[in-house]
Image (cartoon, helix red, strand yellow):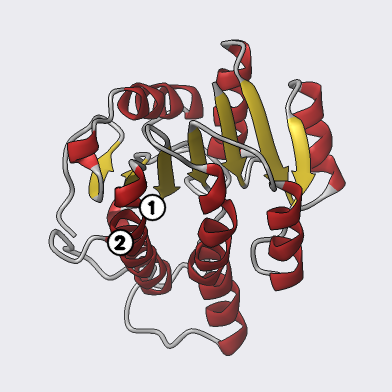
């Protein structure tokens, strides 16, 4: 299987790359800096430099992927931004950084990688339950929440556009994971979260297109 992981320098993205390579799959993965690219090469991945917040960098990715075909593409790149607890207006720089990475990035990357997907391929974006409006009960990190709600909208539109080609598109919540973003107090290790997500991705059927799912396969309200 050919797997593409966008945003794999550390955390969940790196664990996706590690586990798929351990199973002998071909993995093409991206990172923003040389340290991240070196980690991917050490796993045996084909590494590509990419900053999803930079339009020229994404355009270069599209050129590098010309002629490729992937059974699975995972868009993982994301940032959290300010850790607000209420209605604290974000600074312009924080808003731009979070929205450019979490929303504009996928809106550029998905069209760039779409030609590499065909019938039976799967496209996943790493969202968060914090992006859910339907089950929201708190407002902490409201900039991050807004960005993930917007990402969910992007994924839904991608699912409608790519459905005629037989591509199954989903938004995934990885759980609260022990990464730089999730912190050491999180309840899931990256290894467990990614193992769960891989089982979910392997079992996707055409009827799952456009769904918003937790790592254990349970549906999340938009």
Q: Name the residue rendered at 49%, 31% in the picture.
A: 71
Mark 2 touches mark 1? (CB < 8 Å): yes
Q: Name the residue rendered at 35%, 23% in the picture.
A: 202
Picture layout, residue 163 above or below residue 153: above
CA gap, disc 2 and disc 1: 7 Å
Which picture quadrant has residue 222? bottom left
> Within 10 angstroms of label 1, few (less than 14), some, or many (20 or more) residues?
many
Q: In which quarter of the image is the N terminus?
A: top right
Considering depth in this image, is 64 or 180 the residue closer to the camera?
A: 64
Considering depth in this image, is 71 or 43 the residue closer to the camera?
A: 71
Q: Where is residue 25 in the image (x, y as percent from the top left)?
A: 60, 17
* SS of the residue under disc 1: loop
Left or right: residue 88 versus residue 203 is right
Q: Would you name the residue on which mark 1 appears?
A: 127
Picture layout, residue 96 above or below residue 109: below
Left or right: residue 20 versus residue 51 is left
Query: Residue 131 bears which disc, if any?
Result: 2
């Amino acid at each position: 299987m050919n797997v593409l992981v966008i945003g794999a320098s550390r955390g969940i993205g790196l664990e996706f790359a590690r586990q798929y390579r351990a199973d002998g799959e071909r993995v093409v993965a991206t990172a923003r800096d040389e340290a991240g690219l070196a980690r991917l090469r050490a796993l045996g991945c084909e590494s590509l430099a990419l900053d999803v917040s930079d339009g020229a960098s994404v355009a270069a990715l599209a050129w590098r992927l010309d002629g490729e075909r992937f059974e699975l593409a995972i868009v993982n790149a994301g940032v959290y931004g300010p850790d607000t607890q209420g209605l604290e207006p974000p600074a312009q720089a924080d808003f731009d950084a979070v929205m450019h990475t979490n929303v504009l990035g996928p809106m550029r990357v998905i069209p760039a990688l779409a030609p590499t997907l065909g019938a039976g391929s799967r496209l996943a974006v790493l969202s968060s339950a914090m992006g859910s409006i339907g089950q929201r009960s708190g407002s902490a990190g409201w900039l991050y929440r807004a960005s993930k709600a917007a990402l969910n909208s992007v994924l839904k539109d991608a699912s409608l556009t790519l459905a005629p080609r037989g591509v199954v598109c989903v938004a995934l919540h990885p759980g609260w994971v022990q990464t730089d973003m999730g912190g050491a107090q999180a309840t899931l290790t990256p290894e467990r979260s990614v193992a769960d997500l891989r089982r979910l991705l392997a079992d996707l059927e055409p009827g799952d297109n456009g769904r918003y799912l937790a790592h254990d396969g349970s549906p999340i309200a938009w």
